[in-house]
Amino acid sequence: MSTRDSEYGGNDSELTAVVHDAAEIVTVEEDGSLGIYEDAAVAVVDGKVARIGATGPVTREYPPEDARLSVDASGKAVIPGFIDSHTHALFAGDRSDEFEAKLRGKTYQEILSEGGGILRTVRAVREASDEELLSNLVSQLDTMLAHGTTTVEIKSGYGLDTETELRMLKVIARADDRHAVDVIPTFMGAHAIPENRDADDYVDEVVEEQIPAVAEQGIAQFCDVFCEEGVFSVEQSRRVLRAGKEYGMTPKVHAEELAHIGGTQLAAELGATSADHLLYATEEDVEAVVESSVVPVLLPGTAFGLGAEFADARAFLDAGAPVAVATDFNPNCYSQSMGFAASLSCVEMGMTPAEALVAGTKHAGMALDMEDGSGTLQPGTSGDIAVLDAPSYVHVPYNFGVNAVETVLKGGEVVH
Ligand code: NIG
Ligand code: FE
């Protein structure tokens, strides 16, 4: 527990951790390429990355025996913790029977129009107590952390009334307080049209009642909308996102997930941080995203679960867009694993393992407006680190269906 203060840049600074003798340490550079250090160490001081490089020089400056925590990473790869930039991880109930129904040929829209899907989760969430919701979410965060996720965005949207939407956002805030994973909250009152409601009438409620109430509590950073055929039109989505913006919430859009209706152009028009899904995005959409600096967030798990065509990741990458990949973890896309999303990115969307890693780290941070170098493992950034039980970062997508992550550090503390 001793620290040699003078060597760490300030009298009160503490050598939080030294991860040493790693087979490789992977950082993400300014231009989005990977920096790969072999036989390497990373020193974390006061929770932030202080130095990365060859084990010899790093451990001479930052001796592992002086650190609060020393991790021998011999034979292992070390990567930035994942940032999962799109999830609906807070819910109640079970929809595994819908997975079977979809395998038998039922469509997502058919299930929703029969009162299943999102609407079924809404009923379960309304009936659940705050404590049940919190315990569900904490256990999901445990699973995500075990898979290397150190920051996650979570949307409301299973309340569809002011009271329950607020309840969800408060539970999300409590989970953030209590759990090592950092949680970024998004308000998504416009996730579905509640049963027996007219869409325009419900949009009035979201705009006039829900958004002001959420803003008053200051518990959502982003405002998202399901801009989709049979759900919210472009015009309705525009109303919701404009109102959110007026109240200080940055827009995000679920765009072209099941059909092409123009959600991507809306994201560009409003300067949204991200446009997500993009399965049916066109060439014009790719251009619009690049021109307006909207981050395309691709969610291959959803396409996999729906048996749908995957988004054209290459079109976005070749146009120079900072493609992010996230899990979309929700009852319709039941995977908390960024590693599985990376496997799908490579095998089904033609991304390289390096592109998939950057998509789940640096670019994911950009999709959440994180301007502090999150997801890069560069000096000065938070010591959010995943140590793999494998010698190369390539094992993240390569070892499909299995968790390659062994140890997770958040701010230099071992949290898994
Ligand atoms: O991103 N598309 C809307 N929302 C989720 C699905 C949520 C659900 O089915 O419960 C999605 O795929
Ligand atoms: Fe989603």
Image (spheres, grey):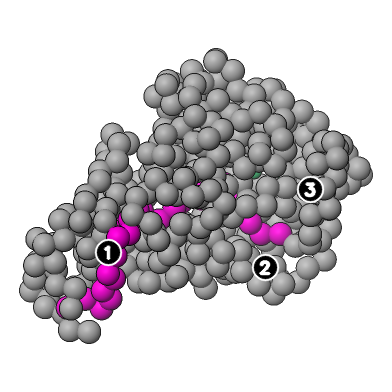
User: Which residue is tagged 2?
Assistant: 136
Crowdedness near tag 1: few (<14), some (14–19) or many (≥20) residues, C-alpha within 10 Å: some
Viewer-side residue, 107 vs 176 = 107
Seen at 38% across and 56% down, the residue is 390
User: Which residue is tagged 3?
Assistant: 99
Which quarter of the image is occupied by the C terminus? bottom left
- Location of residue 320 with respect to 37 vertically, above or below: above
Seen at 16% across and 61% down, the residue is 55
Q: Mark 2 or mark 1, which has the lower sequence index?
A: 1
Residue 74, numbered label:
1
Label 1 residue SS:
loop
- Is residue 146 found left or right of 223 in the rendered image? left
* Residue at mark 2 to residue at mark 1: CA–CA distance: 36 Å
Query: In this view of the protein, can residue 183 be seen by the observer?
Result: no
Viewer-side residue, 41 vs 225 = 41
Seen at 44% across and 52% down, the residue is 82
Residue 197 image-quadrant placement: top right
